[in-house]
Amino acid sequence: MHRSHYHHRVLGALVLALFIASVAGFAAQTAAADPFKTWPPRAFLIKSLVKSVGETLKTYHPETGRFGTEPWVCGDQNVILPLAAAWSIKDPANPYYHDKKLLAVIGKGGEALVDDQDKDGKWIFKKKDLSTWGMIYMPWTYSRWIRAYVLVKDALPKAQREKWEKGLLLGFNGIRRDEIKRVHNIPCHHGMALYIAGVAFKNEEWKKAAWDFQQKVMAEQSPEGYWSENFGPVVSYNMVYTDSLGTYYHFSKDPAVPEVLNRAVKFHGGILWSDGTSAASIDERVIYHHSINTGNVGFSYSPEGRGFILSQLAKAMAAGREGVGGDYAASLLLYGGKGEIVPLPSEQAKGVSVLGKDDAVIVREKPWEWAFSSYTTKPPQNRWIQDRHNYVDIFNAGLGLVAGGGNTKLQPYWSTFTVGDPGFLRHREGEEEPNFIPPIDLKWAADKAVITQSGNPTKMTLKYGDIECAVTVEAMPGERVAIVTYEAPEGKKVEAHLPLMMLADSIKTEKGGEFALSENELVLDAKNIGQHFDFGRLRVVIPEGASIRWPAKQHNPYTKDGHSELRDAKLVVVLPFEKTKVQRVMLSVYQ
């Protein structure tokens, strides 16, 4: 070869290599500057996992092997999964890889679970408020314990490994016998853990039983991508199903799982507000929370799901979150899928997401967004399944969720409409087993609802017995105003309610009054308010005859006596139909 040609080829190869290196370097810098532009965000997840280990070790009690604060609960040991993940994942940024001291902590943490088991392998379901809910095969703990076992079993000292195995086998024999029967979020989680236990202990019967049960779970998913535990979506607990099925898929490669998970992803992506929080009026279990749900490992198996995770993580970090928990980081690092990403529909300035055949709609007409839910069913006696009685959520890009906020029990002032006297239905303080459907002359949940118009405006008609009502939300083009219109027959004991989120700790009325929102009851009518009141930066223009009430509290199913915090109470605009058929409220935002 001619020497000049040789030098040209060498120089060309060198230039190409430098170009590739510079592109790779630029990509690495870009990923470091914005870890949520590419999938997976490994460096971010490793950093979060490592940080969580340091925080967890501060809560470790070496004399018992327990973690957390008093009173100790079995769920405090859930941290052994992220600890085991940190021990097992090799990465230059992870100083805990195969750390002997960390392995000793993990081993003792599992022993603590064995020490606290009863003869059947159960633990007492105790909460930090000292309330107890009986003996249980705690699903969240068993699933993390078995996953930690898979990661560290070969490194545990022989005696310690045998002790772990004795406890795990005791528990999973009970889970196999008693816990995978009816389709529900907890049995779904148990099914995932049982399959992993079958892999770990080479128990084919456990694997088959878990596989068969997960087929039933997937068959119960609605075509719209959610699971129900009574009627309509159970939004927050859907995340239990997707997390369980995503982890199960990693171990089983069950071919039915990806399609089911993708439907769930599309459902959750479609019900997001632009700040990343979720519409709550459609949820039959949980009220609105300001937290941004970042999905889970089940979302990582589709392009839309990976887009969901990255977008939600970016929003959560922008809102002030410093990282994610060790459990979340461990799950994505250990079991996450790979591939392309697709953006979320909530990123659009305008649009309508529809569930089913107009069962629910989420309208984006920024800066306003709103959700209408037409899921109706009779109020149940079950404390965990909420009454479907609030059918409208209203969101503003500058303020967040301003009205609605989900469903509860024993609280008719959260109802979009009531027929009868709302004073008949309320929760008595300290009552642990109330009658949730007392025989009173009051209808607080609709018998039927139909969304008759989607988009801007959106309208829904609701039937309460033979009484028909309607509610409409419209954003005025070019203005910072949303109008909520209620219609009902005159003189039929009908009230409409607009439950406002706690946007400030006081209100200011047009007439110059300022009223603190405390534990004390506050009732003001339009004569004392004037034409409007200001609630933080939200101005609420009310019609003649309207009044406001505070505090309309939630019945909290997660506290034994149902008590709830003031932050979850609503300031309610009450709109009677004694002398009119139409009531209208105007919402606006000022700087």
Image (spheres, rainbow, N blue to C red):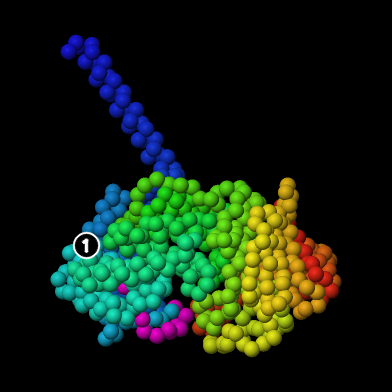
Specify whether residue 157 is in view.
Answer: yes
Residue 340 on image: x %, y %: 40, 45
Where in the figure is residue 188, as x and y percent of width and height? 37, 70
Q: Is residue 133 magenta?
A: yes
Report helix, strand or loop for mark 1: helix
Which is more toward the observer, 424 or 215? 215
What amino acid is at disc 1? Answer: Lys
Residue 559 in the image, given as x and y percentages of width and height: 51, 80
Q: Is residue 149 magenta?
A: no
In the displayed structure, would residue 184 be above or below residue 98? below
Residue located 52% across and 76% down the image = 385
Q: Which residue is mark 1?
A: 100
Provide the residue span drawn in magenta.
Answer: 128-143
Q: Quadrant of residue 456?
A: bottom right
Point 32% across, 68% down: residue: 192
Q: Nearer the viewer, residue 74 or 357?
A: 357
